[in-house]
Image (spheres, helix red, strand yellow):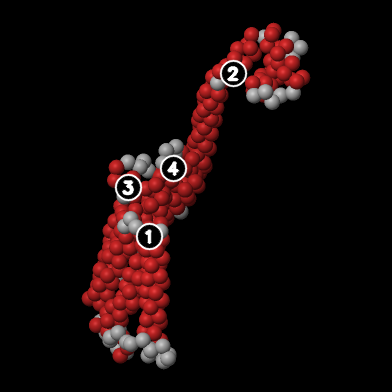
Amino acid sequence: MKYSCGLIRDLLPLYVDKVCSSDSRKAVEEHIFECNECLSLLNELKNGESEEILETEKAEVLSRHSKKERRKTFIIGIIAAALFMIPVIVCLIVNLAVGHGLDWFFIVLASLGLTASVTVLPMLTVKYRFPVTLCGATVCLMLLMMTVCIYTGGDWFFVAASSSLFGLCAVFLPVVFRCLPQNGALRSHKGLLSLAADTLLYFVMLIFIGLYINADNTFWGIALTLSAVFVPVVWVVFLLLRYWHTNPLIKSGALTVALSAAAFFSNYLINRLLIIFGIESRPEYKSIQLFKPFEWNIDTVNWNINWLIMIVGIITGAALIIAGIVRRKR
């Protein structure tokens, strides 16, 4: 045969689409006259069967490549884990050799565990890599804080642990929910579940802080009163944003008005708490002061700013509501 099968097979798609040159067309026709395999492939191309074959082959190639890469990553993870064991063994030997028992060795072990959880664990994890890595890192972080607290004779572990859990969940829990299978309640209420967990961890953190500092009635009064006000505000804002199905402009306007008013009255609430618990005694903290736009001094600046924020917020919110109503009517 004058031409190789590889060359002709490269030309067959162009031949079928009639976009090759006359010389290429002549070469293909001469070759398929002598080669039954290339003729059969040409017929498959004309019948559209080759596209399915190519897609199947493509999927198989990608699958094999993915398995190969996962296997390579897993092997690298195993090697990295083995390398992490070297400093662990060295620290164990040194710790015992100097007669310190197993005290700071556990701190080193927990530190290396935390490092491995964000480097080695992702390489060893095939499914749900981010949630597994985050959970592993969180557990190792808790162990590290616990070992340091025990070694130093401290009593701050529960404060640090609850605060860390609250911060990690507030930032990463929505991402974790998105990575998990979206079935049932998780699919429709990821934000709701995330905020519920954040609320629970917030109050757990508050309790541990109060116990740690041996809080008196002043702490509990201020902390619980403010929490009882601001936590529901956060819930109301979330529920409106998530479940109130209306024009986005109307929703934004209503929330702007509500938050502006809430900010104004929350400032009054904070001032009243400071007065009640004897932290402040200035007269301007005892009641809501009138807006005095032409009088700015140490006694009026706080309330003037609060009034301005609320007025601007209400005007902006009203404008958004009106724009939403007009757009909806159109």
Q: Determine the CA span between mark 1 and mark 4.
A: 48 Å
Q: Residues within 10 Å of mark 3 (few under 14, many from 20)?
A: few
Kind of residue indicated by mark 3: Ser
Q: Determine the CA span between mark 3 and mark 2.
A: 47 Å
Q: Nearer the viewer, residue 244 or 74?
A: 244
Q: Secondary structure at mark 2?
A: helix
Q: Nearer the viewer, residue 184 or 62?
A: 184
Q: Residues within 10 Å of mark 1 (few under 14, many from 20)?
A: few
Which residue shows up at 41% across the image and 57% down it? 171
Viewer-nearest of labels 3 and 4? 3
Query: Which quadrant of the rendered structure holds the C terminus?
Result: bottom left
- Numbered circle sitting on residue 329: 1
Q: Nearer the viewer, residue 106 or 249?
A: 249
Q: Residues within 10 Å of mark 4 (few under 14, many from 20)?
A: some
Kind of residue indicated by mark 4: Arg
Residue contact at pointers 2 and 1, CB within 8 angstroms: no
Query: Which comes before the other along the chain, label 3 or label 2?
Result: 2
Q: Nearer the viewer, residue 21 or 3?
A: 21
Residue denoted by label 4:
129
Residue denoted by label 2:
46
Where is residue 13? Give x, y as percent: 64, 23
Quadrant hosting residue 11 = top right
Query: Which comes before the other along the chain, label 1 or label 3?
Result: 3
Q: Secondary structure at mark 1?
A: helix
Viewer-nearest of labels 2 and 1? 1
Where is residue 261? Give x, y as percent: 33, 74
Residue contact at pointers 3 and 2, CB within 8 angstroms: no
Where is residue 45? Give x, y as percent: 59, 19
Residue denoted by label 3:
188
